[in-house]
Image (cartoon, grey):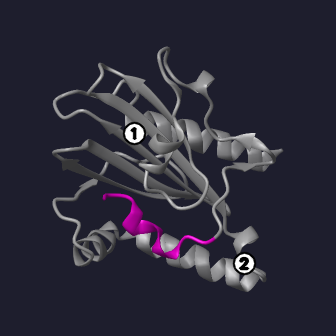
Amino acid sequence: MLCGWFWIIAPLPVLATNNQALLTIEDLPTGFMAASASEVESCQMAGKVIAFVLEHDQTQAEKICVSSFSIAAATETPEQAAAIRQIYDALLQNPQNLTEQARAMGVEDIQILDSLQGIGEVAAGFSKVEPAIGKTDVAIFRRGDRINSVLVRYPVGYEPILPLKAVARKVDQQTRQNSAS
């Protein structure tokens, strides 16, 4: 399990702002399709998740999962929202703390990704290889009052059709557009 551990402080996730999805099938290369309920569940993200898959063959597939939540919707006062935002920012600015927390929960071999500049106002990324699952890349970022997460899972030895940074950039752009509306 790579991404379930970082959700321990994530309150009340939702998928979209202003009723617009943060990622749609039209945003993805040809061949991706909506994930089944069991594939969505295997994303191991809290709350409601959108997910898409691209099958390479019957045993190997690429998966993209996205989840998002509003800090303001999960809190009762602006002060609480500011406190939650500060907690997330501190965690995302120091991804080593998140990896230490994950290791304490039994997750091993996590690598911090440094390639998320320009995504959100603050972001962190991680990668892990699990023999039975494949390689999983995860980005968590905050834009305004929204905490977004993106997961890209793909077979070891392959490069993803749509890399983590490209998916995170699309989600971030949609978050910006939705908050401007």
Quarter holding the N terminus is bottom left
Instruction: List x then y, in percent, for residue 93.
Output: 40, 68
Q: Secondary structure at mark 2?
A: loop
- Residue 138, placed above or below residue 6: above
- Say how many tags the image has: 2
- Residue 98, placed above or below residue 4: below
Judge left or right: residue 49 versus residue 136. right
- The stretch in magenta equals 1-11
In the image, 27 versus 156, the foreground residue is 156
Query: Residue at label 1?
Result: 164
- Residue 118, placed above or below residue 35: below
Query: Dot 1: few (<14), some (14–19), or many (≥20) neighbours within 10 Å?
Result: many
User: Residue 160's image quarter?
Assistant: top left
Quarter holding the C terminus is top right
The reply to whether the magenta stretch includes residue 9 is yes
Label of residue 75 in the image: 2
Could you tell me the amino acid type at mark 1?
Leu
Instruction: List x then y, in percent, for residue 64.
Output: 45, 37
The reply to whether the magenta stretch includes residue 130 is no
CA gap, disc 2 and disc 1: 29 Å
Residue at (30% x, 51% y) in the render: 114
Instruction: List x then y, in percent, for residue 125.
Output: 36, 54
User: Residue 86's image quarter?
Assistant: bottom right
Could you tell me the amino acid type at mark 2?
Thr
